Image (cartoon, rainbow, N blue to C red):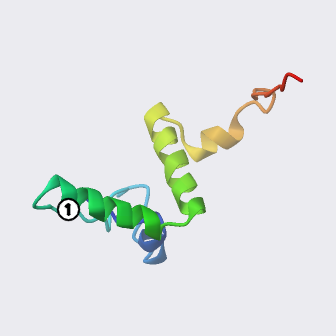
């Protein structure tokens, strides 16, 4: 399965809250190897920022949190990483 990147999708303005999969493509491959190669090429085409954005969007979907809810959360809740020296 191969989806267009979010940047390609949003560049056309087809992404909306009502149709989150608008403009997405599904591809069928003849073998797992062919699918893995296409996935690797898609990942290589994306910038690191696009990959991080995609990861954050997936995490928000998994936990059922919107960006608005994320921005409105209590700012006191945070993670502090301490280094032992």
Determine the secondary structure under disc 1.
helix
Nearer to the camera, 42 or 15: 42
Q: Residue furthest bottom?
A: 12
Crowding at dot 1, Cα within 10 Å, few <14 / some 14-19 / many 20+, comes out as few
Query: Where does residue 56 sit, x and y in percent of width and height?
Result: 55, 46
Image point 70% across, 33% down: which residue?
73
Image point 52% across, 57% down: which residue?
51
Nearer to the camera, 74 or 5: 5
Among the 4 quarters of the image, the one containing residue 84: top right
Residue corresponding to mark 1: 34
Query: Where does residue 54 sit, x and y in percent of width and height?
Result: 49, 53
Please determine whether, in this image, residue 28 is positioned above or below residue 66. Answer: below
Residue 25 horizontal side relative to residue 10, left or right = left
Among the 4 quarters of the image, the one containing residue 39: bottom left
Q: Residue furthest left?
A: 30
Q: Residue furthest top?
A: 84
Nearer to the camera, 67 or 52: 52
Please determine whether, in this image, residue 78 is positioned above or below residue 31. Answer: above
Residue 71 horizontal side relative to residue 51, left or right = right
Residue 80 horizontal side relative to residue 70, left or right = right
Query: Where does residue 29 sit, x and y in percent of width and height?
Result: 14, 61
Residue 7 horizontal side relative to residue 41, left or right = right
Nearer to the camera, 46 or 34: 34
Among the 4 quarters of the image, the one containing residue 16: bottom left
Question: How many numbered tags mark residues here?
Answer: 1
Query: Where does residue 22 sit, x and y in percent of width and height?
Result: 32, 64
Q: Quadrant of the C terminus?
A: top right
Image point 36% across, 61% down: which residue?
40
Image point 62% across, 45% down: which residue?
68
């Amino acid at each position: 399965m191969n989806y267009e990147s979010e940047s390609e999708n949003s560049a056309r303005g087809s992404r909306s809250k009502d149709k989150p999969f608008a403009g997405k493509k599904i591809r069928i491959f003849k073998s797992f190897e062919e699918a893995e190669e296409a996935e690797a090429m898609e990942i290589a085409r994306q910038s690191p920022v696009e990959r991080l954005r995609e990861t954050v969007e997936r995490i928000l979907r998994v936990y059922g949190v919107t960006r608005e809810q994320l921005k409105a959360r209590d700012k006191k809740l945070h993670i502090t990483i301490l280094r032992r020296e």
